[in-house]
Amino acid sequence: MNTKFVILGCGSSVGVPRIDGHWGKCDKNNKKNIRTRCSAAIIKGSNVILIDTSPDIKGQLIKNKIKNISSVIYTHKHADQTNGLFEIRPFYWKYKKRINIYSDLSTINYLKKTQSYLFKKIPDYKPIVKAHVIKSNFSLGKLNEKIDFKSIIVKHGKINSLGYIFNKTAYLSDCKDLSIIHLNELKNLNFLILDCLKIKSHPTHFNLREALQVINQLKPKKTILTNLHYDLDYKFLLRKLPKNVLPAYDGLSINI
């Protein structure tokens, strides 16, 4: 059974264009420069796993015609990854059961504190999600739709973020940790989806130079750069990047 990976959103925390209409260095006439905040989906049969619920998750799922989800895994607790959790309520209404979400303890505790009404019953609201602290190795789905994951801890400024490895693919959307070049699990993958925020150095994300350094060390067959800021135009990146490295765009889909 084929497994599909979809980049639902590939933009930085403010997206492209910004809320005030600012496009930065991105050509507003190129649709691939329209970037919502980072989320992704892994689809194997009826097993649909979301990676993060960005503030744009409703539009992302509608645009990609994803009408069901099975579970959600989170990379970390920042708003651009988690603020769309509220939006998945209709799936609870549809399935009549709570949706399983998975992450590290820090992220789970943050979500329970900031969106407590989604986790425990309060007057007029039923809980819609059930939280699980993930282990380093875990599986989601049943029988031939099951997907096996390995989670890794990476540095993202002053906090940790989780990267996920599955089907010879790794998703590292928020990372500033050059030590990953020494991880055997990340070497010689079929696909690496990697953080690449800006041209200039940044304290919590890889810039273009650092991302290419990681790619040269890990040697994946193909890399897709995500979490792209508005100073990284799509065609500019195409001209600059090696042939096995591509800039992401919203709706990009690959078979893994």
Image (spheres, rainbow, N blue to C red):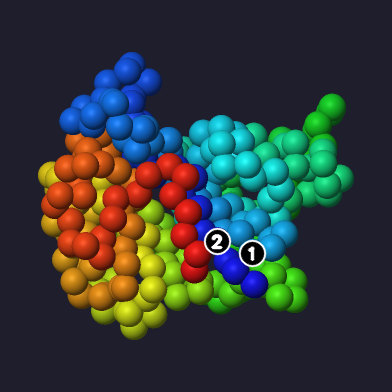
Check disc 1: other Cα within 10 Å, few if <14, some if 14-19, many if 20+. Answer: some
Question: In this orientation, which residue lies closer to the viewer: 18 or 238?
Answer: 238
Residue extending furthest bottom? 184
The residue under the point 34% across, 38% down is 32
Left/right placement of residue 46 relative to residue 72 reads: right
| Percent x, y of residue 60 | 54, 38
Q: CA distance from mark 1 to mark 2?
A: 6 Å
Q: Which three-letter amino acid code belongs to the residue tagged 2?
A: Lys
According to the image, label 1 marks what residue?
44
Dot 1 or dot 2, earlier in sequence: 2
Check disc 2: other Cα within 10 Å, few if <14, some if 14-19, many if 20+. Answer: some
Say what secondary structure mark 2 lies in: strand
Left/right placement of residue 143 relative to residue 115 reads: right
The residue under the point 38% across, 36% down is 35
Assign the N terminus to one quadrant of the image.
bottom right
Numbered circles on residues, count: 2
According to the image, label 2 marks what residue?
4
Quarter of the rendering containing residue 73: bottom right
Question: In this orientation, which residue lies closer to the viewer: 99 or 121?
Answer: 99
- Mark number for residue 186? none
Q: Which three-letter amino acid code belongs to the residue tagged 1?
A: Lys
Question: In this orientation, which residue lies closer to the viewer: 12 or 191?
Answer: 191
